[in-house]
Image: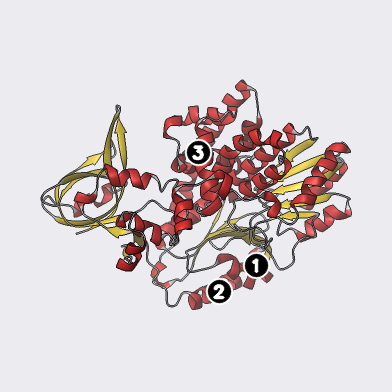
Amino acid sequence: MNKKWVIKDKISDKDISKFPEINPVILQLLFSRNLKTKSAIDQFLSPDYSKDVHDPFLFSDMEKVVARIYEARHKKQKVMIFGDYDADGVSGSTILSHVFEEINLDYEAYMPNREEEGYGLNKKAIEQFAKDKFSVLITVDCGISNKEEVDYANSLGIDVIITDHHHIPEDVPKAFGIIHPGYDDKYPFKFLAGGGVAFKLAQGILKDEKGKGLEKWLLDFVAISTVADMVPLLGENRTLVKYGLIVLNKTKNLGLKKIFEVSGISSKEMDAMTIGWQIAPRINAAGRMEHANSAYQLLTTDNIEEAIMIAHSLDKRNTERRSLTDKISTEALKQLTKVKDEPILFVKGKNWPTGIIGLVASKIVRKYSRPVLVLGEQKDKLVASCRSIDEFNLIESLNVYKKYFIKYGGHKGAAGFSMKPENYEDFKKDLTKYAGDKLKDVELVPKVEIDLEIKLSQINWDLLNILLTFEPYGQKNVKPKFLLKKLKLKSFDTVGNDGKHLRLLVSDGDIDFKVIAFSFGSRISELKVDLDIDIVCEIGINEWNGNKQIQLSLIDFKI
């Protein structure tokens, strides 16, 4: 499917005159990220931990929650951490574990089995916690949608503390305390990841000066959770990840060090992309392919043999996960024969693991640019993972049809549910009509959002060094994309043994530039030497044998 190129609105001369000290190219990039005031620009370009990371006690329930945790320590009561099974939940649970070790709290951690228990709290687990004499239950990256389960815990004498960041239902659980940036009007930043929320609780617990040293050493896990969960990398999140990457580069955590070793990661090259493509997938592989406990054990062990064993196991599981994702994606795509006529896509299959279908949904959204529901058939129910585009609010749509679900939850862009098989056809019909109405004026084609048109002569180390200040990249702060028009294609060849990638040499008549084109091998038949070509690319650094060169990475081309 051809991609539509969308160039962002160009800043005005009036805007440029307001910031004469800022390069217009950089100002364009800032404005396209809705950073239009001096304070917002300063915070973005120069994150400051002491100023930009908010006081945890701005959460209304923080004081009583912290007091309850210290009361549990004083009374020698047992505390259970109940964490989600993804990298966000595992990282957040790890954060609280390290803090509870620091304050000598009697605690354990529990992650549900994705296939057998599903997302969030469940009564069977809560019943076991009561039998095992746990007095306090703290959720991480879940809980806000579990009113019935929280009521059950209350009836068994367990105080429930919810730390979460997911969509808030109309009927909020009657928990002892709720730490949730969207639930609390007083907290100024609404987009923390689940691990970020757990970190705010950690800050509250470590409020005295003695705890400050540990606080910052937890930022590697905050960075992992924030990047992995794809929350906006602006505001407080940007500051947490910026400093978290510094900690990650010199982490003390044995498990992370072993992940680096099996992944071939050098601490010198650690950035948000390293988390997103190397670290988080291996942590996620545990919950997707077996059980999240192994990832949690890796991040909390101080036994080197155990760390080596688990790290290698997760690396193997991640390889298996990639293979299985490709297999199921191929099966799913074969079901999509009339994509152009559908505002929303449904695919369904047997033996599709719950831990994989979300990845498949993401791949299909990128390919077809419309909401996607991928459903796995289980014994007596269907389990779905959903992904969407900016123009369609998933959780809002699921709220409309909640009568069909056994259980559901999520965000605007990602959600999930389970339902009885007999409800599927009616639900599919209703949601398709709803999506058609909502998206009737939306052009459902993949888009390439372009920050700015530039010339080859503008690409230099000065520009690149300024672009480096925009890191870390992620949601709402994607790597800038530039349009270069009316170039000549001087040469091209394949890269790699399988010919999957291309290397181009382009010229404007005065300057030649090499362009690496990952995964463009299938389009080689479109190219000819001396062809006029327009390209969209990202600008980065290629380092080889100690030599650094500016490198253009191809996003798309037109001839």
Instruction: Kindly identify the amino acid type of the residue bearing the numbered disc 3.
Output: Leu
Q: Residue 276: give x, y in percent of width and height.
A: 48, 44
Q: CA distance from mark 2 to mark 3?
A: 46 Å
Quadrant in which the N terminus is drawn: bottom left
Mark 2 sits on what residue?
429
Residue 275 vs 336, above or below: the answer is above
Say which label, 2 or 1, has the lower sequence index.
1
- In the image, taking residue 217 as reference, residue 41 lies left or right, namely left
Q: Residue at x 79, y 56 (%)?
A: 175
Of the residues shown, which amino acid type is indicated by label 2? Lys
Task: Name the mark nearer the viewer: 2 or 3.
Answer: 3
Could you classify mark 1 by the number of other residues whose Cα lies within 10 Å: few (under 14), some (14-19), or many (20 or more)? Answer: few
Dot 2 alpha-carbon crowd within 10 angstroms: few under 14, some 14 to 19, many 20 or more: few
Secondary structure state at the residue bearing disc 1: helix
The residue carrying mark 1 is 422
Label ID, residue 245: 3
Question: Can you see residue 121?
Answer: no
- Whether residues under marks 2 and 3 lie with C-beta atoms below 8 angstroms apart, the answer is no
Q: Residue at x 36, y 59 (%)?
A: 19
255 or 127, nearer to the observer: 255
Q: Is residue 393 visible?
A: yes
Placement of the C terminus among the 4 image quadrants? bottom left
Task: Determine the residue positioned at 54% across, 34% down.
Answer: 247
